């Protein structure tokens, strides 16, 4: 797998060609390719390499792969991202480093399964790298950093949507409760107003009746 998006990548043969073209332009020494019998295949493990064109340590790692191709070539395919001249690839390196938890202090930044090499020299990391590569190749369930990132992003998005749904539901319930409360207030307010009006009308009718009685009584006396 590779990162989904508009990323420029090179395989091992293409990386050596690019480095040799750069060497010609800058007066440096070329890498003598030993890849005559090397080929890529789907069953091989993937090495992810973030590099800078002309970077000495990156060139050292590429030379290491080239010089050990008879021993290691059957185990790997290389996917290389150049980051010094490609802002998109550079942003991807930052994203990957944040995900792995291993800061990218420079290049090369090499990923073999779950193993990350932040920098490389053959003297320090050569044997460790060989062991990591062979173990990764033989693993029945190969870990891929980009597949893991994609899965994590989907789970985060799903969790975010669940939180959003909870908020929507909570807001909906709050709205319903508010409407119900307001409705009750209006109902009881109207009920009290109706009772008050009815009381006033009764009082007015009572006064009118009393006045009528008094007037009738006065009329009888006058007769």
Image (cartoon, helix red, strand yellow):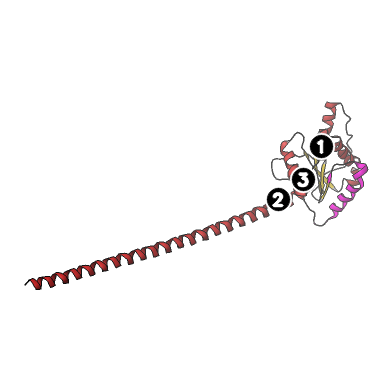
Residue ID at (59%, 55%): 164
Q: Is residue 174 in the magenta section? A: no
CA gap, disc 1 to disc 3?
Answer: 22 Å
Q: Which mark is residue 88?
A: none
Q: Earlier in the sequence, mark 2 or mark 1?
A: 1
Q: Secondary structure under badge 1?
A: helix
CA gap, disc 3 to disc 2?
Answer: 14 Å
Does residue 217 appear anywhere in the picture? Answer: yes
**The one of 171 and 12 positioned closer to us in this rendering:** 171
Q: Which residue is mark 1?
A: 15
Viewed as shown, does residue 50 lie left or right of 188?
Answer: right
Report the predominant secondary structure element of the magenta stretch: helix
Which residues are the magenta region? 117-141
* Vertical comparison of 140 with 223: above or below: above
Q: Which residue is mark 2?
A: 150
Q: Which residue is mark 3?
A: 97
Does residue 35 appear anywhere in the picture? Answer: no
Q: Position of residue 45 (x, y in %)?
A: 82, 49
Q: Position of residue 28 (x, y in %)?
A: 87, 28
CA gap, disc 2 to disc 1?
Answer: 26 Å
Viewed as shown, does residue 189 lie left or right of 20?
Answer: left
């Amino acid at each position: 797998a590779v990162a989904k998006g508009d990323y420029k990548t090179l395989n091992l043969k293409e990386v050596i060609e690019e480095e040799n073209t750069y060497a010609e332009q800058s007066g440096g020494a070329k890498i003598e390719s030993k890849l005559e019998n090397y080929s890529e295949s789907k069953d091989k493990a993937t090495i992810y390499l973030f590099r800078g064109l002309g970077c000495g340590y990156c060139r050292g790692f590429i030379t290491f792969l080239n010089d050990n191709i008879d021993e290691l070539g059957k185990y790997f395919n290389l996917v290389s991202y150049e980051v010094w001249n490609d802002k998109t690839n550079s942003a991807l390196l930052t994203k990957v480093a944040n995900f792995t938890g291993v800061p990218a202090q420079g290049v090369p930044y090499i990923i073999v399964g779950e193993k990350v090499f932040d920098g490389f020299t053959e003297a320090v990391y050569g044997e460790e790298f060989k062991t990591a590569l062979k173990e990764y190749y033989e693993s029945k369930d190969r870990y891929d950093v980009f597949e893991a990132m994609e899965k994590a992003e989907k789970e985060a998005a799903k969790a975010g949507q669940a939180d959003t749904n909870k908020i929507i539901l909570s807001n909906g319930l709050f709205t319903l409760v508010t409407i119900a409360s307001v409705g009750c207030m209006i109902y009881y307010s109207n009920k009290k107003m109706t009772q008050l009006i009815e009381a006033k009308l009764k009082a007015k009718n009572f006064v009118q009746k009393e006045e009528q009685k008094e007037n009738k009584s006065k009329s009888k006396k006058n007769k």
